[in-house]
Amino acid sequence: MASEGQPTVRTASPLVRAFWAIHRGIYRLSRGRFGPWRPKAGKRFGVMGLTTEGRRSGQPRLAMVGYFEDGPNLVTLAMNGWADTAPSWWLNLQAKPEATVMLKTGPRTVRARTADGAERDHLWGRFADFPGWGDDLEARMTQRSEKTPIVVFEPRAT
């Protein structure tokens, strides 16, 4: 229970967490053939497999993450199913920003960073072009205690 003046911390629901686990399982069992899909403006966001290095364990960690493309970059929100807590993949990227993403077209090595200023404003406006983030993205964001980071994945040379 939250103290007076403290926001209530929400975590992802058990149903959402189960869906994520099932999605990761399908992705792993199919060796990446099923799970990722490309974004389609006006229709849906894309989904990619994101492999980070665990900040404490040093082991590879897989998350399925929604995204859209902005030129050569991939863009997502660092959110945990609208919960107030940061997702583990984002904490891992803050410790080590290099990662690998598996797209429908194949793997890509990337470096993650946060969008700020005018870039953030531009990218924030683009989320509405890719339905599926929530019915009213602006209203959802006001329910969070902190501004949700917009994460940009820039391609890296291998």
Image (tube, rainbow, N blue to C red):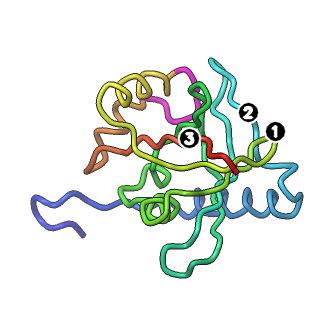
- Work out whether 51 lies above or below 40: below
User: Is 58 located above or below residue 151 in the figure?
Assistant: below
- Indicate which disc, 3 or 1, sits on the residue closer to the N terminus: 1
Majority SS type along the magenta span: loop
The three-letter code of the residue at mark 2 reads Arg
Whole-number angstrom distance, CA of label 1 to CA of label 2: 9 Å
Q: Nearer the viewer, mark 3 or mark 1?
A: 3
Q: Position of residue 126 (x, y in %)?
A: 49, 23
Dot placed on the residue nearer the N-terminal end, 1 or 2: 2
Task: Name the residue beneath numbered marker 1.
Answer: 105
Mark 2, other Cα within 10 Å: few <14 / some 14–19 / many ≥20: some
Mark 3, residue position? 154
Residue 113 placement, left or right of 75: left
**Nearer to us in this view, 29 or 11:** 29
- The numbered dot on residue 129 is none
Residue 68, how many percent across, how many down? 60, 32
Q: Which span is picked out in magenta? A: 129-136
Relative placement, left or right, of 155 versus 133 is right
Q: Is residue 19 above or below residue 92?
A: above
Q: Residue furthest front?
A: 157
> How far separated are the C-alphas under marks 2 and 3?
17 Å
Q: Which quadrant is the N terminus positioned in?
A: bottom left
Task: Tell which circle, 2 or 3, labels the residue nearer the N-terminal end.
Answer: 2
Q: Mark number for residue 38?
A: 2
Tell me if label 1 and label 2 are in contact, CB under 8 Å. yes
Look at label 3 and name its amino acid.
Glu
> Which of the 4 quarters of the picture holds residue 24?
bottom right
Residue drawn at point x = 87 percent, y = 59 percent: 31
Residue 10 or 95: which is nearer the viewer?
95
Which residue does the image show at 58% across and 34% down from the upper left? 73
Question: Considering depth in this image, is 4 or 24 the residue closer to the camera?
Answer: 24
